[in-house]
Amino acid sequence: MKKYFQFEELGTNYRREILGGFTTFLAMAYILVVNPLTLTLDGIQDLPDALRMDYGAVFVATALSAAIGSIIMGLLGKYPLALAPGLGLNAFFAYTVVLGSGAPWQHALAAVFVSGVFFLILTLTGLREKIINAIPLELKHAVGAGIGLFITFIGFQNAGIIVNNDATLVGLGDFTNGNTLLAVFGILVTVILMTRGFKGGVFYGMVITVIVGMIFGLIDKPTKIVDAVPSIEPTFGAVFSAFGDPTFYTTAMLGTILTFLFVDFFDNAGTLVAVANQAGLMKDNKLPNAGRALISDSIATIAGSILGTSTVTSFVESSAGVASGARTGFASLVTAACFILALFFFPLLSIVTAPVTAPALIIVGVLMVASLGKIDWSKFEVAVPAFLTMIAMPLSYSIATGIAVGFIFYPITMIMKGRTKEISPIMYLFFVIFLAYFISLH
C-alpha cells in the first residue's frame, strides 16, 4: 500500500493520510444534509409531488456517490481529492431545471448522466488533460488563490461573521450571537495550533470547537448513535426513464446538458489544480495522472446520476485534508470510508455544524492564497488576468465565472504586449467560448 501510493517519495505516512482524509470528510460532511434539502426543494410550498425527490433516497445517493467518486479518485487518480455532489450544480438542478422550467427530476438526472458521458469521452481522448496543461502557470496560481478567497468567504458566511447588507451588499454579522462567537473561537484555536506547528491543527481545531460548543449548549448532543439506512429505491435507476420520454429531447434540455458540462469542467479543473498546487504535486506546470483524475470525476458523475443525485465533482474542501497532511489517494479512501459509515451514523453528523467547519475553510483559504507569491505581479499583462480570475470568484460566487473572466483577459493583454507566441491555441478557443457565454447571459 505504501509503495502504491508512494508514501516515501511524497514524505507522508498512514497517520497523516488518515487524519487528512478524516478532516476532509468533516469539512464536507455538510453536503449530506445540504444536498438532500436542495434536491427535494425543501421549503418550497405547493409543489407537485412529481417534482419533489425523496429525501431519504437522495441522502443515500449523496453518501454513496461521494464514496464511489472518492474511491475511484484515490485508487485511479491517486490524489488526496474527495468527490461529492457539487454545490451550485445541485442548486441549478433543483431551482432552474426542475422548479424553473418544470422539468421532471428524472429528466434533470438524465441531463447529468449525458454530461458525465460526454466528460468521459473528452477525457479518454486526452482532450481534457491537454486543456488543463495548456492553461498558463500564472492563471493556475490565480485559480488556486481565487478558490482560497472563495472558500474563505463561504467560511465567513457560515460563521455569521459576514452577512447580507442591503446598503453595501455585505457587512459584519452579530457578534453577540453564540454560533458566531463559537466560530470566532474556532478560528482563534486553529490559528494558535497552526502557528505553533501542530500537524493536523485544522482537524484538532474542529474537535475542540465541537467540545466547547456542546459545553455551552450551542451544539446539541446526538440523541442516537446509529439509525436505519433509508431506501434508495425511489431514485435508483430513475434516470433511464427519461430516455424513453419524447419530451426529454428538447433544445432547452440540450442547454441544460451543456450548462452541467461547462460548470463541472471548470469547477473540477480549478479544484484539481488548486489542491495539487497546495499539496506540492504539480511538476513542470503539469498534473501527474491528470487524465486518471479526470476519468474519476466523469465516472462519479455517471454513477451519481444513476443513484439519484446531481453532478458529482471534486470538492475544494479537500484542501482542508491537505492542510492536515494528506498527500496521496489513500486519504481519499479514508474519506470514502467515512461517507459509507455516515449512512449508519448519520445522527452523529448533527454535531458538525457550520460554525465548526467555518474556521477550517477560513484557515485553508489563508494557505491557498500563498500561491499569489508565485505570480510575477510586475508584468501587467499577467497581473490583470490573474487578479480578475482571483477576485471574480468570491464576488460572483462562482469558480467557473472567475476562470472565464481571467481567460478572456489573458489573450487580450498578452497580444497587446506582443507575446502572441506564448498563447496556446486552446486559450484562443476559450476566449471565444467564454465571450459568447457572457454575451448570452442576458
Image: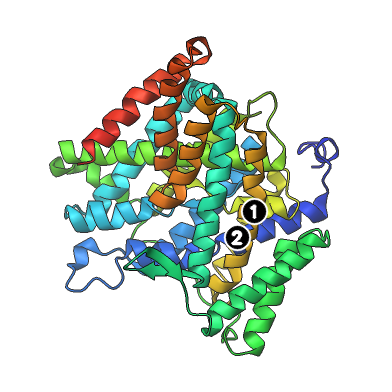
Query: Which circle marks residue 362 in the picture?
Result: 2
Q: Horizontal and vertical percent for residue 58?
A: 40, 62
Q: Horizontal and vertical percent for residue 31?
A: 48, 62
| Number of numbered tags placed on the structure image | 2
Please tell me whether mark 2 sits on a helix, a strand or a loop. Answer: helix
Q: Are marks 1 and 2 in contact (CB under 8 Å)?
A: yes
Q: Quadrant of residue 181?
A: bottom right
Q: Horizontal and vertical percent for residue 203?
A: 71, 64
Asked if residue 324 lies left or right of residue 140, the reply is right
Reading the image, the residue beneath label 1 is 366
- Residue 430 sits above or below residue 267 on the image: above
Please tell me whether mark 1 sits on a helix, a strand or a loop. Answer: helix
Q: Nearer the viewer, residue 13 or 109?
A: 13
Looking at the rendered structure, the kind of residue marked 1 is: Val
Q: Nearer the viewer, residue 301 or 372?
A: 372
Q: Nearer the viewer, residue 439 or 168?
A: 168
Q: Quadrant of the C terminus?
A: top left
